[in-house]
Amino acid sequence: MNTTTPARVSFKAQMHQVREEAIVQTVIRLLGEKGYDAMTVDEVAAAVGIAKASLYKHFPGKEQLAAAAMVHVIKRAQDFLLLVPADISPVDKLKSVVGWAMSLQLADEMPSLPSRNSTLRSVLTGNRDYMNGLVALSDQLGEWITEGQAQGLLNPTLPPLVVLYTLYARACDPVVSFLRQGSQYSNAQIVDLVLRTCFEGLAPR
Amino acid sequence: MNTTTPARVSFKAQMHQVREEAIVQTVIRLLGEKGYDAMTVDEVAAAVGIAKASLYKHFPGKEQLAAAAMVHVIKRAQDFLLLVPADISPVDKLKSVVGWAMSLQLADEMPSLPSRNSTLRSVLTGNRDYMNGLVALSDQLGEWITEGQAQGLLNPTLPPLVVLYTLYARACDPVVSFLRQGSQYSNAQIVDLVLRTCFEGLAPR
DNA sequence: GTCTATAGCTCGATAGAC
DNA sequence: GTCTATCGAGCTATAGAC
């Protein structure tokens, strides 16, 4: 370690960091627009404006690119959690988060990964940042879920895990894409409609 | 047309038909197990037990294989509709169909296609059988939806199209896979839980 | 900029049905 | 004997990796 030129080292590290941010942003967008399988690393390199080989200096493979994108999205979700007002009900907090995720999807910034890709799954589950973030996120959501059930604002006969899974699934609900394609509703209307089907169900109240 | 030997012609045609059925069954299973992108035509040929070239005598490409699988699944759905008791409420009919689709998914017999693949989409929309079947299916479901809303059994403030899309989406709900992987619930319990989240929502009643 | 592997796709020989 | 379906073998283009 060269302690006489800390500024230069820091500068290089910053450059590296900035570049990596740009890569991750691009990957998030491409994953949101085309999905994992349709995304090629050539596209990523071209969109970022760097050589393909440079990508491999940052990430050892396509799967790690996707993992980095997911880590970043989870980070964003955790940042969003901090902004959720503390004085609203747990259920409104959950609605806020899920609605935010739907907005991400409408902005093509919600990565869509194949649910049945074993190698990608193992890369994700083997990624410390991803797993830690996912657990932390789930812990916070789980807290709100149990609070909501205790306060009689969420169906207490549904296992909390089922509620959690359902929320994750609705955050990527394909109905959002269906409705967007129909272009009959505004983004706000789409989020409202899908949130209602999620929390109130299809049966009348 | 040889009217003197109808039986023999019919025999060859039957062979062809049987083979095609076997191909489609295999494709449905592989699409349910691995999804479209992960499925290779080599696998299909190997699983059916025929040469790859023979596949192309039946279907001109991978996309057409998937389309044939979807046509068959829609056909099965239409067959199921005919078995739905006529004396139950429209909502119970809808629950019955969605629950049946979830069972398909649990049996790895629900093809999972990428939602964002333009060439596959155009092949599907260009397939007469698929589009006709889909429209017929949607018409029947739409009828039950409007009946259910008229009878106050479905939320009348939700546009019927939103309800229809939601039902299609829940038929492939990833929560089913999540819960199956956890292996904490029986298949019947999984179907019941996800059906409840769909129709009753997460909020208490 | 190159390499390599994979996967979608095709052709010529062959064997069996008619 | 002809004809067609089948199959092994091979082609090509793409995309991940270096």
Image (cartoon, coloured by chain):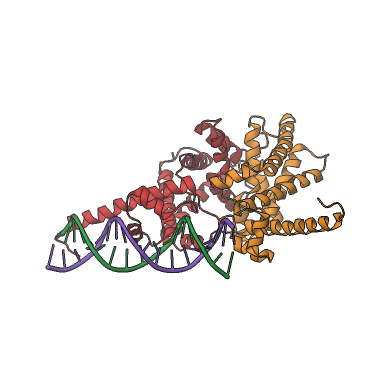
Chain colours: A orange, B red, C green, D purple
Q: Which one is in front, B164 or A15?
A: A15
Instruction: Choose top left, top right, bottom left or bottom right for residue C13.
Output: bottom left
At x 37%, y 59%, the residue is B59
Q: Which one is in front, B153 or B108?
A: B108
Q: How many marks?
A: 0
At x 63%, y 63%, the residue is A52
Relative side of D4 to A104, left or right: left
- Residue B77 seen from this side: no
At x 67%, y 30%, the residue is A156
List x then y, in percent, for residue B54: 32, 58
List x then y, in percent, for residue A152: 72, 31
Quarter holding the C terminus of chain A is: top right
Instruction: Choose top left, top right, bottom left or bottom right for residue A169.
Output: top right
Q: Which one is in front, A38 or A96?
A: A38
List x then y, in percent, for residue A202: 61, 43
- Residue A157 seen from this side: yes
Q: Is residue A142 above or below residue B156?
A: above
List x then y, in percent, for residue B204: 67, 34
Instruction: Choose top left, top right, bottom left or bottom right for residue A187.
Output: bottom right
Relative side of A100 to D7, left or right: right
